[in-house]
């Protein structure tokens, strides 16, 4: 199997507060799983909240309490794509954002600079953020 070095991270799950937190056992993840998790973090981190990178992030959850129409959802998807492209490992990304009740779902395809494309699925509500992706933990 060909491997692509996207770095590694410690696996995150949904914490007691409903948002990403270290997994109880914090296993290392690599490959597209690590890249998918990094992109999810970009999409749920409020801009300006990181002391060492004020331009990092966009908190998609902030839009959950707004009255959103199709044009708003397309704008959120466009901004999310732009945020994902800010990661130097990403060449391009195509995302769609759908509102279903109180849940926003971000789905699409990530095209890394090297390696094969993969699906990214992120489900968000006021109370939770779940990364559901086909990214693999290749070495």
Image (cartoon, rainbow, N blue to C red):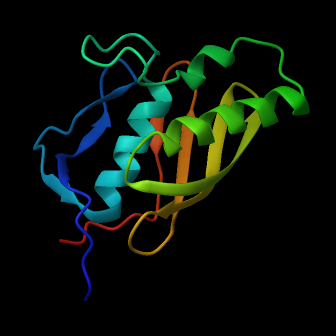
Q: 99 and 9: which one is in front?
A: 9
Q: Residue at x 47, y 26 (%)?
A: 44
Residue 67's spot in the image, x, y percent? Answer: 83, 14
Residue 91's spot in the image, x, y percent? Answer: 50, 58
| In the depicted structure, whether residue 22 falls above or below residue 90 | above
Q: Residue at x 17, y 71 (%)?
A: 139
Q: Residue at x 45, y 65 (%)?
A: 134
Instruction: Give the farthest residue toward the bottom.
Output: 1
Residue 10's spot in the image, x, y percent? Answer: 16, 44
| In the depicted structure, whether residue 107 falls above or below residue 40 | below
Q: Residue at x 70, y 11 (%)?
A: 65
Residue 79's spot in the image, x, y percent? Answer: 65, 32
**Side (left or right) of 28 relative to 101:** left
**Side (left or right) of 14 relative to 52:** right
**Side (left or right) of 134 relative to 10:** right
| In the depicted structure, whether residue 71 falls above or below residue 9 | above
**From the image, which quarter does the N terminus lie in?**
bottom left
Q: 91 and 66: which one is in front?
A: 91
**Side (left or right) of 117 relative to 41:** right
Q: In which image quadrant can residue 92 be found?
A: bottom right
């Amino acid at each position: 199997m060909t491997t692509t070095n996207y770095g590694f991270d410690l696996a995150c799950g949904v914490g007691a507060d409903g948002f990403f937190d270290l997994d109880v056992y914090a296993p290392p993840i690599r490959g597209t799983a690590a890249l998918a998790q990094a992109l999810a973090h970009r999409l749920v981190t409020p801009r300006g909240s990181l002391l060492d990178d004020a331009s990092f992030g966009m908190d998609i959850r902030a839009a959950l309490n707004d009255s959103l129409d199709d044009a708003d959802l397309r704008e959120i998807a466009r901004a999310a794509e732009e945020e994902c492209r800010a990661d130097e490992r990403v060449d391009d990304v195509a995302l769609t954002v759908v509102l279903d009740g109180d849940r926003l779902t971000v789905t699409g395809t990530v095209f890394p600079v090297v390696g094969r494309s993969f699906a990214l699925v992120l489900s968000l509500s006021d109370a939770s953020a779940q990364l559901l992706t086909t990214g693999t933990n290749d070495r």
